Image: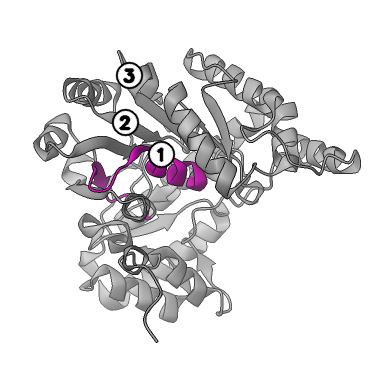
């Protein structure tokens, strides 16, 4: 019998993150620094609003765009944070997390053969979503010597007549890098000069340490050519609620809505109602979680550097990205041995792109005491191999 699976799908490898998660899930006493998921419980105000919505019988579909109340709440939220205005009727789409928003964006934007420039290491879904939409990812390597920051010059050198878009994700998963405002201005100028569309994944926008986040669409002349993807999974500890949003120009949002209509219908109703009713009330909770991540960040990064696992200072998200070559192993072997011998789970940097080879991603969205234990285990490990 012939092979019925499409070549496009066959060309996409399975996630390198999930492989280590699946192994660690079968083991006892594992300290997982693998999956990028907050250990905090969703703020109580959100939980209670969700419970009330269920008790009141709000268990039906919403508008394809999302409830008007949530779109208005998101518009007010972005106005308050970044002084940028979006029309809730035409420029905001509520999605099933940022993962769906990314799929919709690539499918809405790309024709077969269109090139999309992506800086790596990057979130594992970027390249597959471009390929699945028929596009061609053009990768730019970033390095710790430059704080894993992509530059305007590197982007400009990668542009060809087939280039249609630039996909960036800062604060960055897996490195924790954050682009300074000046560097973003330079990238925006390149996008305008070459008539490129920009998709900016800003899911970690509220998790920045010691500097400010720049909403890409607020940069000069960028609003009309920028789609910003974000949501509540990371900063609001709502991964399981599956709620994200996209904001951008009406034609792009309209195209994404059309795909969303035929594939999803609408994002979870309970989550939409809960966030719409509480988004303006829970900033203190978000800041409390951010401050605790910052405390954990300092512990983990300092501890890794003391072990000889050189780690630049991440300024956003909740990841450290140390170089593990001092162990004498590549990143795959390091992760395998650390998991099997010391029951600490981290993710090979090569899962996030070729320039991630030799590094591992360690997530500090876990309890401070667990991080201390993980560092003790890693100390034993490095005494044997470092």
| Nearer to me, 98 or 116 | 116
Snapshot quadrant of residue 48: top right
Q: Is residue 47 left or right of residue 21?
A: right
Dot 3 alpha-carbon crowd within 10 angstroms: few under 14, some 14 to 19, many 20 or more? some
Q: Callout 1: helix, strand or loop?
A: helix
Disc ID at residue 198: 2
Q: How far from the left and from the top, in percent, is residue 238?
A: 63, 45
| Nearer to me, 61 or 331 | 61
Residue farthest toward the left in the current orientation of the protein: 157
Q: Nearer the viewer, mark 3 or mark 1?
A: 1
Q: Which residues are drawn in magenta?
A: 99-124
Asked whether residue 210 is in view, the answer is no
Query: Disc 1 designates what residue?
Result: 108
Q: State the CA–CA distance, disc 3 to disc 2.
A: 8 Å
Q: Is 174 above or below relative to 313? A: below
In magenta segment, residue 106: yes
Q: Callout 2: helix, strand or loop?
A: strand
Q: Is 97 above or below relative to 152? A: below
Q: State the CA–CA distance, disc 3 to disc 1.
A: 19 Å
Which of the two labelled residues, at mark 3 and mark 2, occupies the earlier sequence position? Answer: 2
Which of the two labelled residues, at mark 3 and mark 1, occupies the earlier sequence position? Answer: 1
Residue drawn 30% across the image and 78% down it: 384
Which of the two labelled residues, at mark 1 and mark 2, occupies the earlier sequence position? Answer: 1
Q: State the CA–CA distance, disc 1 to disc 2.
A: 13 Å
| Nearer to me, 253 or 325 | 253
Residue farthest toward the right in the current orientation of the protein: 56
Snapshot quadrant of residue 308: bottom left
Query: Disc 3 designates what residue?
Result: 222
Q: How far from the left and from the top, in percent, is residue 235?
A: 55, 38
Residue farthest toward the front in the current orientation of the protein: 1
Quadrant where the N terminus sits is bottom left
């Amino acid at each position: 019998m012939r092979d019925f699976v499409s070549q496009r799908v066959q060309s996409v490898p399975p996630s390198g993150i999930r492989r280590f998660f699946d192994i660690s899930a079968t083991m006892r006493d594992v300290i997982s620094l693998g999956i990028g998921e907050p250990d905090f419980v969703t703020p109580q105000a959100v939980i209670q609003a969700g419970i009330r919505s269920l008790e009141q019988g709000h268990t039906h579909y919403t508008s394809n765009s999302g409830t008007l109340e949530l779109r208005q709440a998101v518009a007010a939220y972005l106005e308050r944070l970044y002084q940028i205005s979006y029309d809730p009727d035409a420029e905001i789409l509520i999605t099933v997390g940022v993962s769906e928003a990314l799929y919709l964006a690539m499918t809405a934007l790309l024709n077969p053969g269109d090139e999309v420039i992506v800086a790596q290491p990057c979130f594992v879904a970027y390249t597959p979503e471009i390929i699945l939409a028929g596009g061609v990812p053009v990768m730019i390597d970033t390095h710790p010597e430059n704080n894993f920051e992509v530059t305007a010059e590197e982007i400009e050198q990668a542009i060809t007549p087939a280039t249609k878009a630039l996909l960036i994700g800062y604060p960055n998963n897996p490195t924790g890098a954050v682009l300074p405002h000046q560097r973003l201005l330079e990238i925006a100028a390149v996008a305008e000069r070459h008539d490129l569309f920009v998709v900016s994944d800003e899911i970690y926008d509220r998790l920045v340490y010691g500097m400010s986040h720049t909403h890409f669409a607020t940069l000069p002349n960028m609003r009309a050519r920028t789609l910003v993807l974000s949501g509540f999974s990371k900063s609001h500890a709502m991964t399981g609620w599956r709620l994200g949003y996209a904001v951008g120009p009406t034609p792009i949002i309209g195209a994404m809505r059309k795909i969303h209509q035929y594939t999803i219908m609408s994002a979870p109703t309970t989550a939409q109602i809960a966030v719409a009713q509480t988004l303006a009330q829970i900033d203190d909770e978000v800041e409390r979680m951010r401050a605790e991540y910052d405390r954990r960040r300092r512990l983990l990064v300092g501890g890794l550097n003391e072990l000889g696992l050189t780690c630049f200072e991440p300024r956003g998200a909740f990841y450290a990205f140390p170089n593990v070559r001092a162990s004498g192993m590549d990143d795959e072997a390091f992760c395998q041995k650390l998991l099997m011998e010391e029951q600490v789970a981290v993710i090979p940097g090569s899962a996030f792109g070729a320039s991630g080879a030799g590094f591992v991603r360690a997530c500090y969205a876990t309890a401070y005491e667990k991080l201390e234990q993980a560092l003790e285990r890693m100390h034993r490990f490095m005494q044997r191999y470092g």
